[in-house]
Amino acid sequence: MGVRVQEFEGKYAVVTGGGNGMGRELVRQLAAEGCHVAMCDTAAGPMAETKALAEADAPVGTKVTSFVADVSNEQQLIAFSDSVRTEHTTEYINLLFNNAGIGGGGSFVLDDRSEWDKTFAVCWGGVYASTRAFLPMLLASTEGRVVNTSSVNGFFASLGPGIPHTAYSAAKFAVKGFTEALISDFRLNAPHLHASVVMPGHVGTSIVFNSSLAHGRNPKELTEDQLGQVRAQMSRMGIDPSGASDEDIRQGLQQRAERFRDHAPLTAAQAATIILEGVRARRWRILVGDDAVMLDQMVRETPDDTYEPAFMDRVHARGVLTFTVD
């Protein structure tokens, strides 16, 4: 593949999930370097905030646009690609960051199918449909790169022996495999295009809270049925919920989402910087965070033990994925 610095100034980039988290920081950092950026997300308000932040630091003439689209809806992504052509007056793009994602559907056995399917549709289907929608514009470029966000759960399908994590993990494995397969496909059939897979560890974003909202489970507004499901899940994890009031559980879930965002080892801005450094160096595999590097190493060292309880004990002993046992 070689190593060659890729400048972002004057290039055209598309970022999905640009309303917050790593997507917002990718938009900001790209625009700060003079890259024209088109973002999509499911709500206009957060994207307006991203746009204002990005434009404040961008050189004069840099264009940042937004479009409301759910990445699990292919027709909305096609409409997004049409809007990029119109608003940016371009027939090509150089960079496609498939960043949008949600969690949910942890158990294939117990969880509602609609939640499982929605999580998979966003995390995998969104990457697939977005790449389909923007492929003509990538092919029309002189140089382009698809940057797909997988996860450490793209090589380790677990959060621990007591926490099933099937929909998200299956989707992130699919993203990883798809991206790796694109490397050869592009080399043979579109040699001016390249692909990178991003695998973050714990990054301080609002994904826990946003995932709850996406599945209709605002922690502050949980129904009796939803509270019952949470209590059952706690019991399966070995946690006795009998002493907790409904309000205790609502507040606990809210605080958990805030801890995930506010006490991560890596901020969203730091993660975006690592991703863009990887893109500059034309790396096909971008691990984000010391925890991602360490977990990747551990899985490779003892693959047969990866899903045994003792493996997770060793992971936690090395300070990795400690959020799952908070």
Image (cartoon, rainbow, N blue to C red):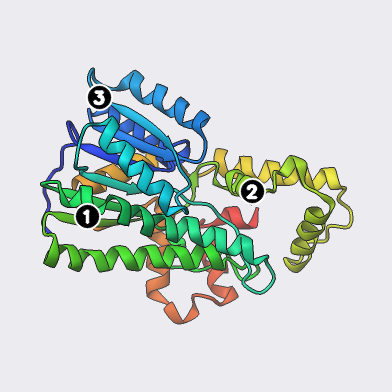
Select label 1 or label 3 by which is in front. 3
Q: Decide if residue 245 is on the left or right side of residue 230.
A: right
Mark 1 neighbour density, 10 Å: few (under 14) some (14–19) many (20 or more): some
Mark 3 neighbour density, 10 Å: few (under 14) some (14–19) many (20 or more): many
Three-letter amino acid code at the position of disc 3: Thr
Q: Position of residue 3 (x, y in %)?
A: 12, 52
| Residue beneath the point at 61% across and 57% down | 324
Nearer to us in this view, 325 or 87? 87
Q: Which mark is residue 283?
A: 1
Q: Which residue is mark 2?
A: 212
Above or below, 151 against 109 in this view is above
| Residue beneath the point at 22% across and 20% down | 61
Q: Position of residue 91 (x, y in %)?
A: 19, 41
Nearer to us in this view, 70 or 265? 70
Above or below, 189 against 58 in this view is below
Three-letter amino acid code at the position of disc 1: Arg
- Element carrying mark 2: helix
Three-letter amino acid code at the position of disc 2: Ser
Can residue 30 be seen from the camera position used here?
A: no
- Element carrying mark 3: loop
Q: What is the number of callouts on the image?
A: 3
Which image quadrant is residue 115 in?
bottom right
Which image quadrant is residue 182 in?
bottom left
Can residue 129 be seen from the camera position used here?
A: yes
- Element carrying mark 1: loop
Nearer to us in this view, 213 or 274? 213
| Residue beneath the point at 59% across and 74% down | 309
Q: Which residue is mark 3?
A: 62
Which numbered disc, 2 or 1, marks the residue that appears first in the sequence? 2
Q: Position of residue 69 (x, y in %)?
A: 45, 43
